[in-house]
Image (tube, rainbow, N blue to C red):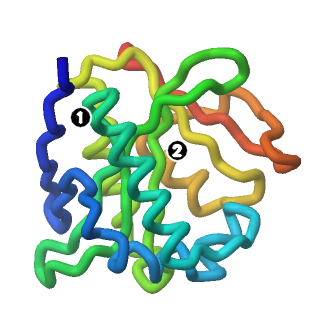
Amino acid sequence: MTPIQPPSLETKRLLLRPMRADDVDALLPIFSDPRVMASFGGVLFDRAQMAWWVQRNLEHQRRYGYGLFSVILKDSGLLIGDCGLERMEVLGRVETELGYDFRSDYWGLGLATEAASAVRDFAFDTLKLDRLICLIRQGNEASRRVAERIGMRLSDEMVRDGRVYWVYALSREA
């Protein structure tokens, strides 16, 4: 049975629609920005890496029925980031991570919090997931604030690829 395509989500300023293969070129400026990629070890994506990353996300979406949304400003139609869900193993447990990446010229406007709140609500209200986590590279205070604003709390720390990450978590009951 093929999972159902996730719906689009809307907030006051944003449209979150399921990521598509033709989003590669719009996402590349985000993943080739040193300010954004500092949280991922500083490796900048080229177009081939971006295409692989989008395909990996599309496969996840097909497999689980959810994944990353492309985040688009309603007033201009500009794709400014991604925000969504990824199933993964963390500290020996299968978890669903809520992640977000935004163009650095749109940081500090509350857009990541707005998008993450919509995805959190979708995960709990529509998908009926029991728990969400955010993996945040230690020292990334902006991402930490987004996680805290949507109700997550620090639950653990872990090391992945030689980097320390904070594990923020939120359960549906909370």
Q: Quadrant of residue 118?
A: top left
Above or below 55: residue 75 = below
For residue 148, which numbered disc appears in the image? 2
Q: Quadrant of residue 37?
A: bottom right
Q: Position of residue 126 (x, y in %)?
A: 18, 25
**Nearest to the observer: residue 77 or residue 55:** 55
Amino acid at dot 1: Phe
Q: Residue at x 47, y 30 (%)?
A: 87
The quarter of the picture where the C terminus appears is: top left
Above or below 76: residue 50 = above
Q: Position of residue 159 (x, y in %)?
A: 83, 38
Q: Residue at x 19, y 64 (%)?
A: 14
Q: CA distance from mark 2 to mark 1?
A: 18 Å
Q: Nearer the viewer, mark 2 or mark 1?
A: 1
CB atoms of marks 2 and 1 within 8 Å: no
Which comes before the other along the chain, label 2 or label 1?
A: 1
Please name the residue that numbered disc 1 is placed on: 122
Amino acid at dot 2: Glu
Q: Residue at x 39, y 53 (%)?
A: 55
Q: Is residue 3 left or right of residue 106?
A: left
For residue 52, which numbered disc appears in the image? none
Element at label 1: helix
Q: Position of residue 80 (x, y in %)?
A: 33, 74
